[in-house]
Image (cartoon, helix red, strand yellow):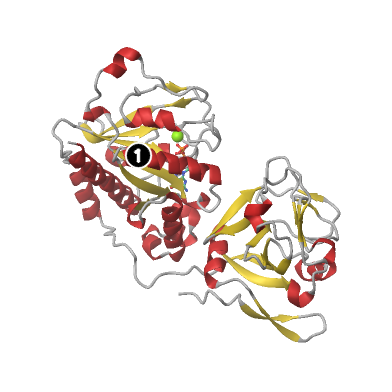
Amino acid sequence: MKASFKEMRQKKQVRDGTVESLTSDLTEEKSKQLRALLGNVELSLLYKASVHGYKASAFHQRCDRQGPTLLVAYNSSGYIFGGYTSVDYAQSGQHITDEDTFIFSFQGKIPVCIKINSGYNARLDDAGGPNFGQQLYFCYNNQPVVYNSGGNAFSINTATMYGNDAQLSECEVYKVEQSSQVSTEEKPWRNVLWTAERKDELMEMIRNHKPVVASVSRVRILMIGPVGAGKSSFFNSINSIFMSRITSKAMSGSAATSLTTQFRTYPVKDGREGKLLPFVLCDTMGLEEQSGAGLDIEDISSILQGHVPDRYKFNPTTPFKPDEQKSSRPVSLQEKIHCVVYVIDATKISLMSDKLQEKLASIRRKVNSLGISQIVLMTKVDEACPLVEENLQSLYVSSYIKTKVQEVSSRLGVPVSCVLPVKNYSQELELELNCDVLLLSALQQMLNFADDYLDDAC
Ligand SMILES: Nc1nc2c(ncn2[C@@H]2O[C@H](COP(=O)(O)OP(=O)(O)O)[C@@H](O)[C@H]2O)c(=O)[nH]1
Ligand SMILES: [Mg+2]
């Protein structure tokens, strides 16, 4: 394990040449949570208002031209909050645009982030104290206070953010640097056999899978997740493995919002001339954060209960209405969804908005009430962790991936054991054994989970 707290106590050379020891007020747990927000980074304390003074000049003396920084403020009501900017402070007099900037506040254990609204400046880079969106000012007027001047750069609720207690007990600014070290676990936290035999064994198990209920010939798996999470890519990846070459049947990587939300069901063949495999992957194409955009809960409920036909185009403003005749006919178990898979991008978990989290929670309640099994497919593990990018076999020794799995588990309220990290095929031209083993293990798990539901459903 890396000494994760080396940034907590460090010697700093100050202007008069004396060496000063700065101690962070962040607990190890909170520091870890904040670092997880920013990827594989280290924090080093540049400025501490109780030591250097709540003065804009003191702040600039220590924080200018330091690259990306994270500000963490504290008040005596116990709130810990602040913001991040990826652009140097430089007193340039310029308006700064910074799409990566965000403000945050710990709500319980989790730092909840608010991204900057589009079209707004991140700040005016002047000689004043630190501010976010020319809206949230720290050390305002060289005083230990935070001040929300109003405005629309950030959608702030000051009660949630800092309990409306504007008096600061501390204000710290950290330099944010990409970590050169990647921390690893001593032992893998899940065991995977990364061998060709294991791949063959998994493929054989999947081919021969017989759902526990005889009337169900194919397990129906529904993939739900935001646009760009990797739903189409997962289908393409599984299809590629069984076709023994990279395929791209489902359109992947298209527009940022799914204007028409079409329901697609994808059976997979065992090779070009092969039989159909005993599962169907269903793609909903998009789950937008806003209500009135993308799929809503009623649409999903109709899909779960087997009312929605393949290629049905949802209307984002009116929920699906099954036609009278068809809906009076009882839907067979074969047509219903037997396993729900939430597809979540590993690199976006910490920045998941409250709205999306709420939407997922209400879907989960619906899925629970129908007794359907649920799994989280955590995609893009290669993008999330450099160690994994280099070698997929490092997946279950990467501490970072472990924290991401725990985070997605707590945000979505599903057990850690139901979170399956994978790397989809995205740019590869050839299949790769490690990738296959991981993807097939995930699929095998989905089939097992579907069996648990079917077992109960009859
Ligand atoms: N590096 C990497 N890229 C991925 C992965 N999964 C998906 N992508 C890429 O992410 C983008 C969006 O994926 P897509 O499958 O279209 O997402 P969808 O909107 O959920 O169907 C595409 O450019 C994919 O190539 C993954 O596991 N790793
Ligand atoms: Mg898609």
Give above or below for 456 relative to 394: above
Give above or below for 449 relative to 350: above
From the viewer's perspective, is 142 left or right of 86?
right
Q: Residue at x 49, y 74 (%)?
A: 2
Quarter of the image with the N terminus is bottom left
From the viewer's perspective, is 198 left or right of 229?
left
Q: Is residue 38 visible?
A: no
The verdict on label 1 being within 8 Å of ligand 1 is no
Q: Amino acid at mark 1?
A: Val
Quarter of the image with the C terminus is top left
**Where, by quadrant of the figure, is residue 342 drawn?**
top left
Please state which of residues 348 and 67 is positioned toward the viewer in this rendering. Answer: 348
From the viewer's perspective, is 435 left or right of 113?
left
- What percent of the width, then of the height, locates residue 293? 53, 30
Residue for badge 1: 367
- What percent of the width, then of the height, locates residue 253? 50, 36
* Residue located farthest toward the left when viewing the structure as drawn: 214
Graded by Cα atoms within 10 Å as few (under 14), some (14 to 19) or many (20 or more), the crowding at tag 1 reads some
Please state which of residues 356 and 220 is positioned toward the viewer in this rendering. Answer: 356
**Where, by quadrant of the figure, is residue 12 drawn?**
bottom right
**Where, by quadrant of the figure, is residue 54 drawn?**
bottom right
Q: Is residue 107 visible?
A: yes
From the viewer's perspective, is 75 left or right of 279?
right
Give above or below for 251 relative to 129: above
* Residue located farthest toward the top when viewing the structure as drawn: 325
User: Dividing the image into four equal quarters, which quarter contains ligand 2?
Assistant: top left
Please state which of residues 367 and 386 is positioned toward the viewer in this rendering. Answer: 367
Give above or below for 357 relative to 323: below
- What percent of the width, then of the height, locates residue 20? 72, 84
Q: Residue at x 65, y 51 (%)?
A: 100
Q: Residue at x 36, y 27 (%)?
A: 302
